[in-house]
Amino acid sequence: MKVFLSTDMEGTAGVVDWQQCSGDTAEAAAGRRLLLAEVNAAIEGAIAGGATEIVVNDSHSTMRNFPAEQLAGQASYISGSHKPLYMMQGLDDSFGAALLVSYHGSVGARAGLSHTYNPRAVVEARIDGTVTGEAGINALVAAHYGVPVVLVTGDRCACEETAELIPGVRQAIVKEHVSRLAAYSLHPDRACALIREQARAAVQSAAAAGPPPLDPGVLEVSVRTTDIAEAASWVRGVEQSGPRQLRIHGPDRLATYRSFCAAILLTRTVAEMV
Ligand SMILES: [Zn+2]
């Protein structure tokens, strides 16, 4: 079975501050090592659960956070900027399961390093009326291709938000919220052991899991300013439903996700200026 793994970073045990999440400092390098260990734990668990091929899509910041040769399980590696399907690049209907590793809580939630794609632009996102973070939005792609999302790892908020939209998803909660810049983390060895075990169980039972039940999959996004909303509405499929409200509903759930990604990219400049 082919298994797809999308990895973020802010949900890693021991990672609590933006300084650990990007750049060339020793602290950022240490953060990437913690993340790599969790990604490899998920890969090892997936293989123990029956995965025969793993594709890792690096979805954080520059999206090239790992030395490719250090990925476990001879995983293929999708990395680098400007991927049309962004955090879900590479997923299609040839996969038997999708894993979301090191995810974090949505913007506005009581969660460490909380944000939803662009913290300067997005104030809240909802799918079919339910507030969601990146996991729920990304699950639109899995729903389109009929691939079950069987595992989420990260802080408690990320896992619980994901489970609200995808009942039955396995969770590896490696971190508890203290403040937006503080957390109570499991020791990395324990975090990795938990992720390995949950990944194994998740992949082992993936054949019985259905795709995320996001139907119709209407994505509503509140943004910070009217300018951001207006620029976003230039994208096909994005309707400005209020002064700072967007409604995104394409002909299918993949189109909805693509419109969202295009809007996020397009509004980046506007969001920086206001
Ligand atoms: Zn993120």
Image: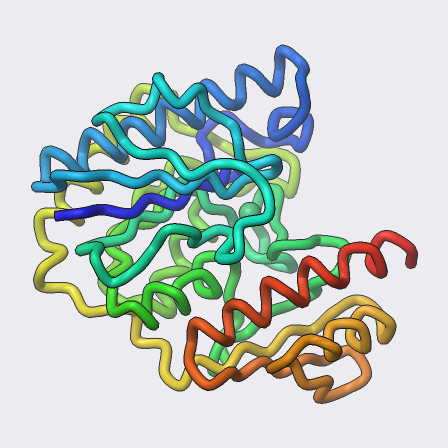
Residue at 24% in and 26% down: 74
Residue at 39% in and 64% down: 139
Residue 157 lies, in percent from the top left, at 47, 52
Q: Quadrant of residue 75?
A: top left
Q: Is residue 76 above or below residue 72?
A: below
**Left or right, 265 with reference to 161:** right
Residue at 63% in and 41% down: 179
Specify whether residue 19 is in view: yes
Which one is in front, 140 or 52?
52
Q: Is residue 252 above or below residue 23?
A: below
Q: Quadrant of residue 60?
A: top right
The quarter in which the C terminus is drawn is bottom right
Residue farthest top in this picture: 26
Residue farthest bottom in this picture: 241
Q: Is residue 111 above or below residue 124?
A: above
Q: Is residue 270 above or below residue 67?
A: below
